[in-house]
Image (tube, rainbow, N blue to C red):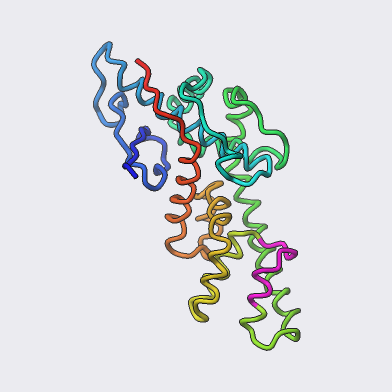
Amino acid sequence: MPHKTQHFTATTGTPPPMGVQPVIDATSSSNGVSAPDGDVTAAALKLDAVAKVLERTYRVEAARQSGLPLTASTIGVGTPRLQPVWFQIARKVVTNGWDPELFIRRVFHGMVAGLRPPGPRFLLSRRADEFFRTAGAAFEQELAIALRSQTNTAACSMTARQSAFKTPQDVWTSVLHDSHIPLSALFRYSLAIGISEKHGERFVKAAAWYLEPAAMQYMRDPEVYDRIWGAIIPPGFPAEARRIYARIVTAAETPMDFRK
């Protein structure tokens, strides 16, 4: 697969997705270089690239918001020419130095799961900006509570099942695969990998069952997950999660349509 290039400002503070080569923006003052007067080509290409990232990330997150499985049929395929609204959103994102993928994901964080996704024009609103700016802090609190709760739930579930199984490995397997226990995909994946370090291949296979949903869960806000759940997230998983998310987003990719 050819190497992808996307343009991000040096002020985003967030690394580009795995597999994406960052390119210094020729119009950015952060690198001490300015585009020649009248030369709008670099800026136009940058807006086009950001607009495409926004549009296809929106389709992925809209499908997730609706509770749909993330497949090519539910994500859909973009049109060759993006609607003008995506260039308006891209201009706002670039002006503020925001990571386009994180902007979309955090806006969706602020919404109640299962509700109908907002239209693209909502992303131009002040309410969307508020969601983006406040979602991180609110999500930190939510994740801290979730980690404590799921840790206690897993421990209690294992204790309660000890008499029903012959070995600890059977107890752990039972808990990992019981969908009625309120444990998230990322917690199950991390738990299985942690157990596999001492108890082998059986739990590597159990972890693989949850890898993709765990990756999508993590990619809601990687920086926050790293801060709050970093102690249980296996080494190497963040990079793998970015690859999985990039693959799913690429499935929604639109043909390139550079405008002069």
Relative vertical location of residue 27 with respect to residue 177 in this rendering, above or below: above
Give the side of residue 159 with respect to residue 93, left or right. Answer: right
Q: Quadrant of the C terminus?
A: top left
Q: Residue at x 50, y 45 (%)?
A: 248
174 in the magenta segment: yes
Q: Residue at x 34, y 21 (%)?
A: 43
Q: Quadrant of residue 138?
A: top right
Residue 237 percent coordinates (x, y) = 46, 60
Q: Residue furthest bottom?
A: 166
Relative vertical location of residue 166 with respect to residue 180 in this rendering, above or below: below
Give the side of residue 175 with respect to residue 120, left or right. Answer: right
Relative vertical location of residue 221 with respect to residue 118 in this rendering, above or below: below
Residue 178 percent coordinates (x, y) = 70, 68
Q: Residue furthest front?
A: 73
Q: Residue at x 76, y 79 (%)?
A: 160
Q: Which residues are magenta?
A: 172-183
